[in-house]
Amino acid sequence: MLVYGDPIVKAYDVAGHEFTHAVTSSESNLEYYGESGAINEALSDIMGTSIEKYVNNGNFNWTMGEQTGSVFRDMENPASVPSSLGVPYPDDYSEFNDFNGWDQGGVHFNSSIINKVAYLIAKGGTHNGVTVKGIGEDKMFDIFYYANTDELNMTSNFKELRSACIRVATNKYGANTAEVQAVQKAFDAAKIK
C-alpha cells in the first residue's frame, strides 16, 4: 500500500519505484522470487530514477530514497550501501545470494546487480575489467521499459533479461550499434552471459 503523506513518499524515486511494481504486475508479471523478483525490484529502481529525472527537469542521482533521510540502494556503486544484513550489496552475478529464501530469495539484495548494469549502460565505465561506453539515461530507461512491457515473462531470469535488453536495443537502434554494444558489455561486466 502506498499512502501519500507518508514520509517515504517524499522521494520521487521511491514513489516511482512503487508505481512501477504495478506496471510490472500488469505487463511482464515477474514472479516475486529469486532472479525474476530481483529483476522486478531493479526495474522499479530504474523507472523510479527516470521519474525522479523527469519531475526534477533532468536533475537526479543514482541513489534510491535519499529524500527520506536514508539511501536504500546506490545504482552506481552498490557496495557503498550496506544491506539490511549488514553486508554490501553485490555488483555482479558472482555475488548473487538467495539467502535460502529470505526476502523472497534476496530480491532486494540481488536487484543491485541489475542496477549496476543499468548504470553502466547509461554512463559507461570499467567494471570487472570490461569497459562500457555509455549511451545516456534516456536510452537506457527505454531499453529496460520495453524489455519489461514487450519481452519478459513471469519467470524471466538474469540471462533472459540480458537477451531481452539486447533484442529491444537491436529493434530500436539496429544490430551492432553503440546501444547494443553498451547493453552487451554492461551485462558482461556484471558477469551475466
Image: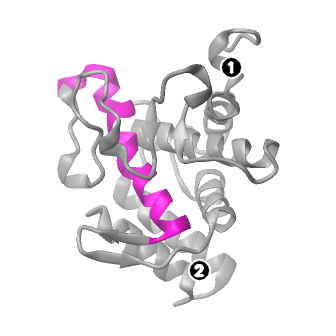
x and y percent of residue 150 in the render?
64, 57
Q: Main secondary structure of the magenta part?
A: helix
Which residue is labeled 2 in the image? 170
- Residue 166 belongs to the span the image colors magenta: no
| Above or below, 111 relative to 127 | above
For this view, does 29 lie left or right of residue 109?
A: right
Snapshot colouring: one colour
| Above or below, 164 relative to 43 | below
Query: Which corner quadrant of the image does residue 14 belong to?
Result: top right
Give, as a single range, the part of the protein colored magenta. 100-124
Q: How busy is the neighbourhood of tag 2: few (under 14 within 10 Å), some, or many (20 plus)? A: some
Which residue is labeled 1 in the image? 9
Q: Which quarter of the rendered picture does the C terminus lie within? A: bottom left
Nearer to us: label 1 or label 2: 1
x and y percent of residue 118 in the render?
49, 58
Q: Amino acid at mark 1?
A: Val
Is mark 1 in CB contact (under 8 Å) with mark 2?
no
Residue 30 seen from this side:
no
Q: Amino acid at mark 2?
A: Thr
